[in-house]
Image (cartoon, coloured by chain):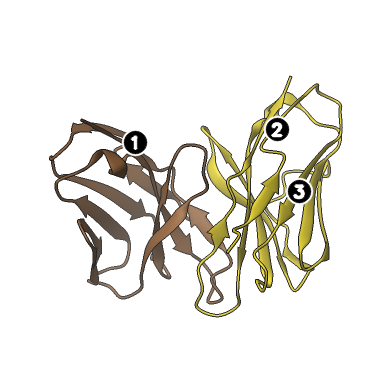
Chain colours: A brown, B yellow
């Protein structure tokens, strides 16, 4: 059974700071998705990475996929209070994109 | 466009009672998913349907849980009888076949006393 570990579990920073959160797997990812979940809402997809070594950018967010496709990171530059939320990584286990296994998440709080 | 709609948003009931959670997927989406989220176990897939047919229910915890999708615009997740350990936030998601993401509803927060 694949295990997805996210670190850190909790992170509290000041607005304007940079941060990186991590997602590691005990086995190779098929493809990996990152989600953000705000309180009282469902997760929202941020990005999908497929190829080892891939880097994707979404405004101030930079996503990296490890060369061996067993780890990924999310870096946020100049965090804003609106970045507060639970960041989840998910392994897409089937080609159809139906079977997602989620990590435990990193709960980020950005203070003004 | 309306997103995935779940009802109720909150449910508090006593153990032993039957609980029914409801979901209306996004129109035109042909896959529907039920998830459960707890602090201890995170977000877990319980069951999913393609074209109203259950495809994988390996995540359903036990026989007390059942899910149905009688038509393309409605699904239910039923727990009977409910137990305190069923307390969680239950999410429904839907997607269109192809390289399309899953869209999640805002969840039902269930508390079993």
Q: Quadrant of residue A32?
A: bottom left
Image spot of residue A11 (x, y percent): 27, 34
Q: Are marks 1 and 3 on the same chain?
A: no
Image spot of residue A1 (x, y percent): 52, 55
Q: Any mark on residue A81, and which?
A: none
As measured in the structure, the alpha-carbon distance from the residue carrying label 2 to the one carrying label 1 is 24 Å
Residue A27 showing in the rendered view:
no
According to the picture, the residue beneath numbered tag 1 turns out to be A9
As measured in the structure, the alpha-carbon distance from the residue carrying label 1 to the one carrying label 3 is 31 Å
Q: Are marks 2 and 1 in contact (CB under 8 Å)?
A: no
Q: Are marks 3 and 2 on the same chain?
A: yes
Q: Any mark on residue B22, and which?
A: 3
As measured in the structure, the alpha-carbon distance from the residue carrying label 3 to the one carrying label 2 is 16 Å
Chain letter for mark 2, please.
B
* The C terminus of chain A - image quarter: top left
Along the polypeptide, which appears first: circle 3 or circle 2? 3
Q: Are marks 2 and 1 on the same chain?
A: no
Image spot of residue A101 (x, y percent): 51, 56
Relative to B103, does residue B7 appear above or below in the rendering? above
Element at label 1:
loop
Residue furthest to the front in view is B1
Left or right, residue B84 beside residue A80: right
Q: Any mark on residue B86, and which?
A: 2
């Amino acid at each position: 059974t694949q295990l997805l570990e996210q670190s850190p579990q909790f992170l509290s920073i000041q607005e304007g700071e940079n941060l990186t959160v991590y997602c590691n797997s005990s086995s190779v990812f098929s493809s990996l998705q990152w989600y953000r979940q705000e309180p009282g809402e469902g997760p929202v997809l941020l990005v999908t990475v497929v190829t080892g070594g891939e880097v994707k950018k979404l405004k101030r967010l930079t996503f990296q996929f490890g060369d061996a496709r067993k780890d990924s990171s999310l870096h946020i530059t100049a965090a804003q209070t609106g970045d507060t939320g639970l960041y989840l990584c998910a392994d897409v286990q089937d080609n159809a994109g139906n079977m997602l296994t989620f990590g435990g998440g990193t709960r980020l709080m950005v203070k003004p | 466009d309306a997103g995935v709609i779940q009802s109720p948003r909150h449910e508090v009931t006593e153990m032993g009672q039957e609980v029914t959670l409801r979901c209306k997927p996004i129109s035109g989406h042909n896959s529907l998913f039920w998830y459960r989220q707890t602090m201890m176990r995170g977000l877990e897939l319980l069951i999913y349907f393609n074209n109203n047919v259950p495809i994988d229910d390996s995540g359903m915890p036990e026989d007390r849980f059942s899910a149905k999708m009688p038509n393309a615009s409605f699904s239910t997740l039923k727990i009977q009888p409910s137990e305190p350990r069923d307390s969680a936030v239950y999410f429904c998601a839907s997607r269109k076949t192809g390289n399309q993401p899953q869209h999640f509803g805002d969840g039902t927060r269930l508390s079993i006393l």
